[in-house]
Amino acid sequence: MQKKRLLTGVQPSGALHIGNYLGALRPFVSMYGEYESMLMIADYHALTTLKDPAQIRENILNAVRDYVAVGVDPKRVIIFQQSAVQAHTELAWILECQVTVPFLMQAHAYKDKVAKGLESNAGLFAYPMLMAADILMYDTDVVPVGQDQKQHVEYAREAAAKFNMAYGDTFKEPEEKILRSVAIVPGTDGKKMSKSYGNTIPLFGTRDEVHKAVMSIITDSKGESPENVYAIHRLIKDETEIASLYKSNKGKYKVLKDALAADIEALVAPMRERRESISDADVIRILKDGAEKAREHAEAKMQIVRRKVGVLLA
């Protein structure tokens, strides 16, 4: 049987944290072998908020390095830059011509980001249609996303349905895959772990940096067991493994934080070592190979789309 196709995108927005690993990287590593998988470095999406060219270049290299370090085999996954496949922006424009402004105004992510003070540029507003193009381009079956990104896949389905209704059956309607047990990873303050909240535990930080972040986790002085510490710990190790630890150390917050820091270090240290061995040249070669394969898929699809909308004359 032919495997279903899975596509996931990672925005090159800076250093990763434990929440990124638990919520996106680890689930991808565990599932990508079951599918014909594609991993897209969503660099054009990053332009909606990141305006530093040098930082974007560095982040692109690091995003690939991070995924390979945590266990993604570039020989089994097509890893490519979004910007290396120009058909993405072409298809995004075509899809934008199928939807209305009120439809895009319903996007939760857009409203949330503007509410947080981000510039409401046109790219941020049209973001869902570029993401829809990313997904629909490759006849994607499955898109792993966090609960807060579910609407993006719904938008892709809606865009596919509108195009198919107007021009005939062309795009497959994708399904989201949400691993609910790790859909939201708590940060050091109990809120969702996010760089914008300043509540992260660095994924590839030094032992001391990880320990410092763990020791800053807010605890309830009235409780026998620190809820925020436990909420992160149970995502690192099986709950049956840590139950006795928390039972025998009730009220001993430092002991429990030290244990969490040690378990994070045991998890991260081998990945950190692998990451340091991956050169820029290695990353560029991986991206070059991936772009060639992605462009082959994309161009075949766009030939069909151009013919359907009427711009392909021959």
Image (spheres, grey):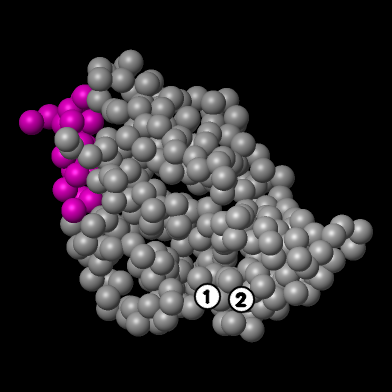
Which quadrant of the rendered structure holds the N terminus?
Answer: top left
**In the displayed structure, would residue 236 be above or below residue 92?**
below
Q: Is mark 2 on a helix, strand or loop?
A: helix
Residue stretch rendered in magenta on the structure: 293-314
The crowding category of the residue bearing disc 1, from other C-alpha atoms within 10 Å (few below 14, some 14 to 19, many at least 20), is few
* 15, above or below 89, in the image: below
Q: What residue does disc 2 label?
A: 262
Task: Judge whether 116 appears above or below 189 on screen.
Answer: above
Where is residue 123 drawn, in percent x and y? 50, 46
Name the residue that disc number 1 marks. Answer: 266
> CA separation, marks 1 and 2?
6 Å
Residue 10 x %, y %: 44, 55
Q: Name the amino acid, label 1.
A: Ala
The reply to whether callout 1 and callout 2 are in contact (CB within 8 Å) is yes
Tell me the chief SS of the magenta region.
helix
Which quadrant would residue 278 be assigned to in this image? bottom left
- Graded by Cα atoms within 10 Å as few (under 14), some (14 to 19) or many (20 or more), the crowding at tag 2 reads some
- Residue occupying the far left of the picture: 314
> Does the segment drawn in magenta span residue 121?
no
Write the residue at 61% across / 55% down: 239
Q: Can residue 296 be found in the magenta stretch?
A: yes
In this picture, residue 265 sits left or right of residue 259 = left
Q: Which residue is at 75% across, 74% downward?
A: 255
